[in-house]
Every structure is written in C-alpha cells, then in structure tokens.
Amino acid sequence: MTPEPENRETLTITDNRNGKSYEVPIENGTIKAPDLRKIKTGPEDFGIMTYDPAYMNTASCKSTITFIDGDKGILEYRGYPIAELAEKTSFLETAWLILNGELPTKEQYKAWVDEITVHTMVHENITSVLQSFRYDAHPMAMLASSVAALSTFYPEAKQVHDPEVRRMQIVRLIAKTPTLAAFAYRHSIGFPFAYPDNDLSFAGNFLQMMYRTAEPKYTPNPILEKALDVLFILHADHEQNCSTSAMRAVGSSEVDPYCAASAAVSALYGPLHGGANEAVLRMLKGIGSKDHVPAFVKDVKESGGDVKLMGFGHRVYKNYDPRAKILKQMADQVFGVTGRNPLLDIALELERIALEDDYFIKRKLYPNVDFYSGLIYQAMKFPVDMFPVLFAIGRMAGWLAQWNEMIQDKDQKIARPRQVYLGYRDRSFVPFDRRG
C-alpha cells in the first residue's frame, strides 16, 4: 500500500538539465526568488532568476494596508470594505486608518484634523517657484516639481528612521498637497492664489482654493464637497500600482519623502495611470451620441485592438471595480447640482451593451474607476489637466502609508532589479580607421 504524501508547505522543483531536485519553502502562497539561485548546473552558474516584466506575478513586499481580490471585485483598506468607508467616513478619517491601521477615536480624529488644517499653508518662496512656470505649464508637472521643492524647506525630513520626523512629514504632505495643486491651477488661468481657509473641511478648502474669486467667504456646495471627499477616499490607496511602486522604489534609497512622493506624482502623470479617465472622456466624445454606441462596440470587437474600450478592464480586477459602483451611484447626486453631463447617457448605454456581450464577458472587461470619475470631475468644472492632480491628492495618503511601512520593513533593501543580458560580450576596441 502506497503511503500518502506528507503535506508540506514546500515546492519541489526538478531541473531537467541535470536531474537534480530542489525543495523550496512556500510562505503566504509565495516562494522567495533568492531560493531559486541554488538551482545551478555548476559552480560557475549564477543560478535561476525569474523574468517578470511589469511585475505581472511578482510580490515586491508584504503589506497590511490594502487588500484586493480582483476576481470577486473586493477592495478593502485595513480590512474595511471601500463602500462602507466611502459612505460613513471622511477622507481624513480614512487617511488616518490607512496610515495607522485602526479607525481614530473622536479625540484622535479631532487632533488629526486640526493638525492637518494648520499645516495647509506653504512657505511664500514656494509660490515663487510656481510663478516661475510658463502660463500653460501642466499642473501635474508643477505639482511634481513643487512637492520635490518642499524637501529644501524641511531638511530634517532626510532622517527617515526617526518616527516623529516621519510623522511630521506625513502631516505636511497630506496638508500641503491640495494647496500646491490649487495654486498650480490658479497659475494656469492667471488668477491670484487663494490661500487656505481653516474654517472649511479638507475637500471644501480645496474647492475654495480652486474657485474662490472676489467673495469675502467661499461656501462650497455640500453635495459637491462630499462627492470630492468620496473621490479622495476611493483613490487613497490601491496596493502596489505603478505610482506606489515608484514611491517604494525611490524611498528605498532612504531619500526624504518629498522627493519620493515627487517620483510617485510623476508616475501618476502618465496616461496609462492617472490619465486614464481623460481617455474615457475622449472616447465618449468620439462616439458622439447614444445611437452610435452599437457601431462603436462593433468596431472594438472587430478592429483587432486598434479601437479600444477605455475605462473597461483592469490589471487586477476581473470583475466590476467596486469603486466604479460607488461613483455610478454618486453621479446622480452630483448631476442633480451641476446638471446632467451629456456624455452620461452614452456611458450608460455603452456599459449596458458591453455587460451583456459575450465578447466582453469572456474577457472579464468590466467598468473601472476611470469610467465614471472623469464624468464627475468634468461636471464639477475641473479641467481635464487637473484630473491626475485630483488623483494625487487622495493617493498621497496611500503613498505615505506604503512608504512608512517600507521604511520599517526589515526585509526591504534598496530596490535593485536584475536583468537578463542579451548583448555582446568580450569585444575588442576598434580604432576609427578600422571601422566599417
């Protein structure tokens, strides 16, 4: 009788080049890449490496911040479902949760809001930096530059292993990012800067810094104020995406968090990341009307990839993005104040047809957060260039939580990926007169 195999948390690998077998430990559903180095054909062999462009199946860290189950459409911050946080908390309450691991008490929350509020002002020399940009400079590039410039005002920030120093920079970055963002917008339209108003909420203050003109006191619409706060919550963190990976990779050199955050902002600037909702608006405008949706869907299916369905599908989600569900419900409230965005009817018809079509169902293409966020931003009179900036304001909390976690993780070292070298070797120099 054959004995049952022992149940061990290991993986046995047989190298068919020499017949040797290796037993590699499995921990949390992963194997450590350095364990593959012992698989060699001889003493001179470097050992096996993994080749994984774009980190399609590589975990670069352990984290306790954000959980995503893409197949089931689940997104949780510190174990709390995103829908519950969007409904019941404010952005600053969610930011505290992401940064500290637990929801704040009333006393902690009040102290946290007060501290953020009193740090919204930026040094006047920063305004000179912003004013030095061309009138048509993209606000995202201005944000990346001004966030990096903050490091020169807080030189103690380089003491990244001091917990209190880290905490202070986290407060400053969350508080000052909306100010820098609004100032960048005001510069682009030739308006004087509107300074922070400590009587307003985090989202309300940002709206007044954006839109205040000559009125002595700006009062934001409460529905739009809440909608913007929810958008910040939905964008607060999203596991190891491109910009968060940039924050961790640059931060692993132990540079100050302002420079690391500037790198994250720059990553988010890319059209494949923070610019995706702009692409959705361009697509909807290109479709033109609800009646043209069936023809557009047909073109998507038959073009071989030349015509793309923007705002559908996601690297992680293979189900309906839970953030998109929240935004779809919130859109009606926003449009009740701003008027209905004429592109919404096209978007709803596009979603209806796509979700009933086997072509998209088989490919697990469902609406993602970008499908509705651009429509809401546009209805709230935000220019398209500000879309990734709005994304950055909310994501700053997540970037800082991930950076703070990385700094304290003893497994982490300075990021230094390997490569597979396929170029020439051992070539001899050729003088000019012998080169063909």
Image: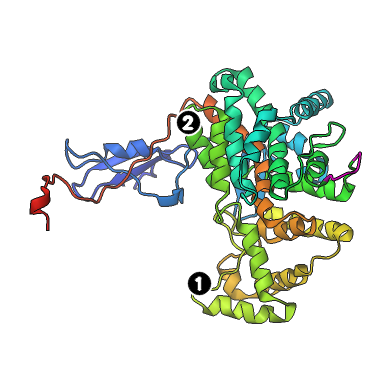
The x and y percentages for residue 341 are: 79, 65
Q: Amino acid at mark 1?
A: Gly
Q: Which residues are magenta?
A: 212-217
Of residues 301 and 210, the one nearer the viewer is 210
Query: Is 214 a magenta residue?
Result: yes
Quarter occupied by residue 259: top right
Residue 22 in view (yes/no): yes
Identity of the residue drawn at 86% across and 36% down: 200
Identity of the residue drawn at 18% across and 46% down: 18
Q: Quadrant of the C terminus?
A: bottom left
Query: Is 242 a magenta residue?
Result: no
Name the magenta segment's main secondary structure.
Answer: loop
The x and y percentages for residue 111 are: 80, 23
| Left-right relation of 417 to 353 | left
Marks 2 and 1, how far apart at CA: 38 Å
The x and y percentages for residue 213 are: 85, 45
Identity of the residue drawn at 58% across and 39% down: 145
Residue 311 in view (yes/no): no
Q: Earlier in the sequence, mark 2 or mark 1?
A: 2
Estimate how packed mark 2 is, as few (under 14), some (14 to 19) or many (20 or more) residues with alpha carbons within 10 Å: some
Whether the residues at callouts 2 and 1 have beta carbons within 8 Å, the answer is: no
Q: Give the colour scheme of this rendering.
A: rainbow
**Res. 252 mark:** 2
User: Which residue is denoted by mark 1 in the rendering?
Assistant: 305
Quarter occupied by residue 232: top right
**Res. 228 mark:** none
Of residues 392 and 311, the one nearer the viewer is 392
